[in-house]
Image: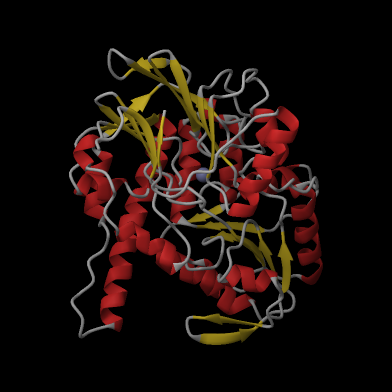
Amino acid sequence: MGKSQFSIQFLGAAKTVTGSKFFLKLGTVGILVDCGIFQGYREIKEKNEDPLPIKIEEIDYVLLTHGHLDHVGYLPKLVKDGFRGKIYASSPTLDLAAIILMDSGKIQEEEALRNSRFHPHDEPEIPIYTAEDAREAIRHFQRVEEGDWIKLSSEISVRFQYIGHILGACFIEIEYQGKRMVFSGDIGRQKEILLKSYKKPEKADLLLIESTYGNRVHPDESGKEALKHAVLENAKRGGTLILPCFAVERAQTMMFLLWELLNKKQIPPIKMVLDSPMAAEVLELFSRFPSWHKISVEDLHALSSQFTIIKKFKESLHSVESDEPKIIIAGSGMLSGGRVLRYLQKYISDPDSTVALTGFQAVGTKGRRLAEGASTLRIYGKDYPVRARIVNFEMFSAHADQNDLLDWLSDIHVAPEKLMLIHGEEEATLELQEILKQKKAWDSYIPEPDEIVEL
Ligand SMILES: [Zn+2]
């Protein structure tokens, strides 16, 4: 039995949050919406090595909602396996994706090399893709204007619209034979610190909506107040404050808030350091795309000048060695690697210093262990007693909570014929399903991994 000519297949982010890939078959045309890798536990990551259950030649176009790795990270593999079409997204999304894919290619190469060293008698491990493969994928990028309908073919039109979340992020609408299909991608918040609030869809015959926090309402505390408090407490003791951050976009948010607090004299002057080449590159994107966020070019310039921005590794080592009290922004956000680890080696046992976690901490990461009150932390094979003050800012999130999700849907007045809940763990997705039924009388469906749904 052949596949229907009007169908969608869930190649990722079905009953899980990573690996977003949705394959639409519209007549003879194949469209892949997002092309992310699976992240997290080993069993999940291993799925990246399985061949896709579709033929690469069936994909004519790739459309990207935004530049996060779990939405773009599979692109180099797709191109390596033979995809020859164009990859459409907003300009900031493509520039961000380029930074992220080059970094990811390098990491894949390093990981394969490390694993091969651990198992010298096995065949050398081959990375899923290399930095060169990433460079090849970037050659397929095609920029689109936000808010404009563009024709992919005589029968298919698409539109990318602003959705907050991270710089460049959009939801995608596709029109085909009088039907409108809407792909939410990741949805931002009604009130964001750096970004404007999202646009909303007005109609949808088919709607795929993310459900990451379908069962959660974010705490109403001010992140700025919490940060101010941590800085002041730390200043009293004269220690160093370490802010482990995701390079996209938590690092820039922290920089902005620190700059504001300093400007309003709500915190005393202290040396402030951004030690992350990737976060520095992302900050440059903010300057290049002023219409995509709320910070003026002058303010961006002023805030950058308040920070020592470290790119070279050697300078990073000097910064770690210096005893001058400072605020450090460095990756990775969950302490799973990156330059922040050397700062932790020096400061984690210093009772005058503070480590303030700034985002979601996945199970199994060092960040999660610190958040749960671990008394020692293992860094590069050595255990360090935890004596620094540990703070956990749980209010920062780039994802819509349950209220935001309902608000984002509030301009749609006719129930979608098919509503699919994706990009969520089971609990979150089931609760969102229940809430949509109660509050809007909308039925929804939770697709299985690799399931094909006829439209
Ligand atoms: Zn995202």
Closer-to-camera residue (392/309) = 392
Q: Is residue 321 left or right of residue 239?
A: left
- Whether residue 279 is visible: yes
Percent of width and height locating residue 214: 66, 44
Residue at 24% over, 35% down: 2
The image quadrant where one finds the N terminus is top left
Label tally:
0
Percent of width and height locating residue 66: 46, 38
Closer-to-camera residue (60/297) = 60
Closer-to-camera residue (345/396) = 396
Which quadrant of the figure has residue 220?
A: top right
Rendered position, 356 above or below 421: below
Q: Is residue 254 left or right of residue 331?
A: right
Q: Is residue 394 left or right of residue 253?
A: right
Rendered position, 210 above or below 388: above
Residue at 63% over, 56% down: 359
Task: Residue at the far front: name it.
Answer: 1
The image quadrant where one finds the C terminus is top left
Percent of width and height locating residue 382: 52, 87
Residue at 58% over, 53% down: 425
Which quadrant of the figure has residue 295?
A: top right
Rendered position, 406 above or below 178: below
Residue at 52% over, 51% down: 15
Q: Is residue 206 left or right of residue 26?
A: right
Percent of width and height locating residue 395: 72, 51
- Whether residue 268 is visible: no
Closer-to-camera residue (159/393) = 159
